[in-house]
Image: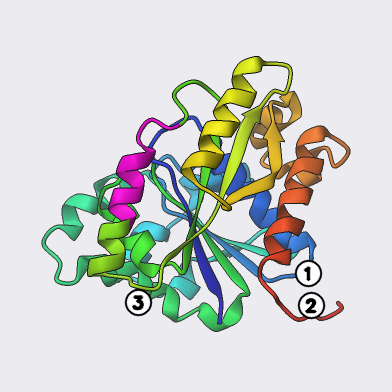
Amino acid sequence: MAKVISIVNQKGGVGKTTSAVNLAAGVGLAGRRVLLADLDPQGNSTSGLGVNKRGLDKSSYNVLLGEVPASSAIVSTPYKNLDLLPSTMDLAGAELEMIARDNREQLLKKALALVWETYDFIFIDCPPSLGLITLAALTASDSLLVPVQCEYYALEGLSQLMATIRQIKRLYNPMIELEGVLLTMYDRRLNLTAQVVEEIKRFFPGKVYASVIPRNVRLSEAPSYGKPIQYYDKGSKGAKAYDALAAEFLDAQDLPDPAVD
């Protein structure tokens, strides 16, 4: 059964979608079967994997609201072991429709349960908010991964996020745990970076990944080509950083060796 990991931070611009796409691709390259579920109405994970949002007739919106099974909306990608549950702008109205639903926090969990056996990992790219879609994602998840930028306002909102997690743990999903905290936009030349890293490690003791994601032009370019960084420029600093993160992530899972293709 797949392990489900939400990638979440209600603060925008922290590298959440970049991390969702490239970590999913890195884990797929390591031989694990991966589904990336795009639950962000902006659909940047979808376009970042080269899928045309305008050409879709089924998406995570239809799956979340129970209109179609997840298997019928999932699309394959040209990237090793990586499938996508795409997003479209329709998802922007999903929260209004969810309000009237019974057990709305369970909608995504029920939908993903039908494809759990197909994958080793399901990564969920959450919207940059703590609304009903994020609530449904966290209720469906075994853990959450939090990207945090190495900038002055890095900890802004994290107290609220962790308070929300505690509430979800108490009310809806007692099993959810913090998978890890990922430092993004890292620049070792700046004194501020070291100060922010120290503060984040104090806030999340023992949960900060040793792998850090640098500021990197190639990382910024890759989405416009619809490619994960490992396929756009595998020799770049960004690709090496996400390869290291995927290895560190997998080392923490205590899994048997993947089957050889």
* Magenta residues (range): 155-165
Mark 1 belongs to which amino acid?
Gly
Q: Are marks 2 and 1 in contact (CB under 8 Å)?
A: yes
**Residue 107 found in image quarter:** bottom left
Label 2 environment density (alpha carbons within 10 Å; few <14, some 14–19, many ≥20):
few
- Report whether 102 appears left or right of 73: left
Q: Would you say residue 162 sits in the magenta stretch? A: yes
- The label number, if any, that marks residue 258 in the structure image: 2
Magenta segment, prevailing SS (helix, strand or loop): helix
Of labels 2 and 3, earlier in sequence is: 3
User: In this orientation, which residue lies closer to the viewer: 148 or 116?
Assistant: 148
- The label number, if any, that marks residue 249 in the structure image: none
Position of 236 relative to 70 (above/below): above
Res 76 seen here: yes
User: Which residue is identified by label 1?
Assistant: 31
| Residue 253 placement (x, y as % from top left) | 66, 70
**Residue 11 found in image quarter:** top left
Label 1, secondary structure: give it.
Answer: loop
Residue at (79, 46) in percent of width and height: 230
Label 3, secondary structure: give it.
Answer: helix
